Amino acid sequence: MVTALALIVIGIDNPDDKNVIYGLIAVSGILGILLVLPIGGADMPVVVSLLNSLSGIAAAFTGFIINNSVLIVAGSLVGASGLILTFIMCKAMNRTLPDVLFKAFGGSGEKESLTRTKVGSDADEVAMMLDGAQKVIIVPGYGMAVSQCQHQVKEFADLIANKYDTEVSYAIHPVAGRMPGHMNVLLAEANVPYEQLIEMDEINSEFPDCDVALVIGANDTTNPAARSGEGPLAGMPIIDADQARTVVIVKRSLSVGYAGVDNDLFYMDKTMMMFGDGKKMMTELNNAIKDA
């Protein structure tokens, strides 16, 4: 940043030196990469919005330079709206913009140490439990996106719907994944019917009547600790997967999520953990259902 500012000063004194401009472009590109590179996946929506705002501000400055009023007005609108959206998203995630840009993952960088254990379940156990389930709600998370198992999830939904005549729907948290709408896009790739994708506020009331909640790679968005009013997740709206009669969680381990808070949902008596890669576990579960 200091180098970029120095090149700007040099460029003002030497307006005909193109090497200064090329150097400024190169240094600005490096600055952009270094600024965004350390930012965690859960904060990426905030950064995308901020960069969008900065692009509008850059356009407005260009309008001043070339004396174009339309560019000034349009750039100012983009910059202002992007900045407003950035602060709204920060507030919704209980994060400040400086924390997003300059602090460690999870805000303070402090994560709870795990002191509890949970015995994992295999695909055959889960398949037996699913036999007779009348209502299943699938809760996709960032782990589903990382393992790219949306097609296996769709196959699972089709299998239980056809074999057990089960009603299947998907609970979509607004900030699940890297940015709003991420889960919708992934599931649309797998040709999941749009009417089965239900937003969090609408589907939460259905969990008490749900036989099985299948959570795939979601952690913070299903963590009951958010209801306590304390900690990094305080006040964050969550999916009420813990209200279902049985919960099946597909996750690599019991490790904490992005917020660094242990998830009590993992240790409930009614929770079955399938430890492993999302695509591998869903493939095993689908095979177990076929063989059941």
Image: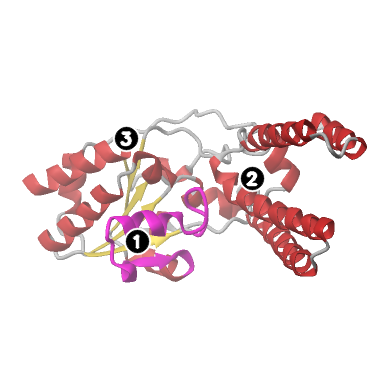
Residue 250 on image: x %, y %: 33, 42
Tell me which corner region of the image, top left, top right, bottom left or bottom right, holds residue 83.
bottom right
Tag 1 residue? 170
Vertical placement of residue 58 versus 169, above or below: above
The colouring scheme, among rainbow, by chain, secondary structure or one colour, is secondary structure
Left or right: 20 with respect to 156?
right
The amino acid pointed to by label 3 is: Asp
Tag 2 residue? 232
Foreground: disc 1 or disc 2: 1
Residue 240 on image: x %, y %: 45, 58
Tell which residue pokes out farthest to the front in this image. Answer: 16
The image's mark for residue 277 is 3
Left or right: 290 with respect to 203?
left
Q: Nearer the viewer, residue 122 or 78?
A: 78
Q: 10 Å neighbourhood of mark 2: few (<14), some, or many (≥20)?
A: some
- Which numbered disc flags the more N-terminal residue, 1 or 2? 1
Quadrant of the rendering where the N terminus is positioned: top right
Q: Nearer the viewer, residue 32 or 129?
A: 32
Foreground: disc 3 or disc 2: 3
Q: Secondary structure at mark 3?
A: loop
Q: Secondary structure at mark 2?
A: loop
Q: Distance from label 3 to label 2 (Cα)?
A: 27 Å
Please indicate, yes or no, whether residue 103 appears anywhere in the rendered image.
Answer: no
- Which numbered disc flags the more N-terminal residue, 3 or 1? 1
Q: Distance from label 3 to label 1 (Cα)?
A: 20 Å
